[in-house]
Image (cartoon, rainbow, N blue to C red):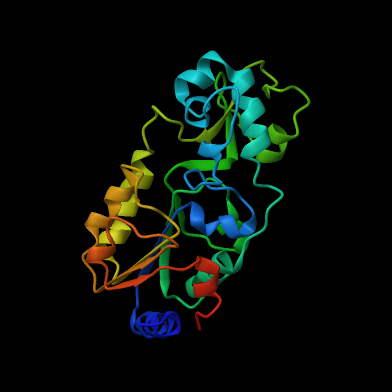
Amino acid sequence: MQLQEKIDKLNELIKESKSIVFFGGAGVSTESGIPDFRSKDGLYNMKYKYPPETILSHSFFMSNPKEFYIFYKDKMNSLKYNPNITHNKLYELEKQGKLKSIVTQNIDGLHQKAGSTNVLELHGSVLRNYCMKCNKFYDANYVFNSKDIIPKCECGGIIKPDVVLYEEPLDNNTYEQAIKDISSCDMLIIGGTSLSVYPASYLVRYFRGKHLILINRDQTSMDNIADLVINANLGEVFSKIV
């Protein structure tokens, strides 16, 4: 099938479906200008004093919060970015009662900025930050705009972003809800993810519905089990979703 034929088919399946879950990765937000991690232009292929996967680990944050925050403030600030066509179309599907939930690996908060309300953030969010000493909440503006490199609470404690760093477990309640939603929907659309990050990628195995759709620029390890595979940018596809 040609690309347009595949998009037409996707529109047909969306029209038939009553309970859709969208499972998304970094490719959802790259068209807003946010860099991904694993592509040739991604964060993991940029040169820093330390490898990004080291910087974004729990042990590094605890032992070297200054270097962590230099990188974090430079590369993880999503406040200056806006939702793109994919975020907006997903919000429209939610308003129509078609989209049950969004399960995302992203931490940028752009789904909520577009208006979506049922967003399960597997890896947390830059929008939420807590003092490690007293647990007081701080928003992203406070953290990214703090004069000190390491943002501090009024009690003197270090503020930590509510994002899942390497060596940290996923939030169990969020993961359990994602399993529940994916296992009970009739259509699962996977978009903008290589499905290479465990345990998030394992969620796909809980799908028991009618139609599994994979939209990604590159091939994935699960293309062979999908009902429809569209190798294209998400924006190109979602701009034609009716």
Q: Is residue 75 left or right of residue 237?
A: right
Q: Is residue 32 above or below residue 172?
A: below
Q: Residue furthest right?
A: 147
What residue is drawn where x is 59% and y is 69%? 85
Q: Is residue 158 visible?
A: no
Q: At which x and y percent is residue 95?
A: 52, 74
Image quadrant for the N terminus?
A: bottom left
Q: Quadrant of residue 145?
A: top right
Q: Is residue 117 left or right of residue 145?
A: left
Q: Is residue 176 above or below residue 90?
A: above
Q: Is residue 85 left or right of residue 181?
A: right
Q: Is residue 130 visible?
A: yes
Q: At which x and y percent is residue 63?
A: 52, 13
Q: At which x and y percent is residue 68?
A: 59, 24
What residue is drawn where x is 47% and y is 26%? 57
Marker count (numbered): 0
Q: Is residue 57 left or right of residue 76?
A: left
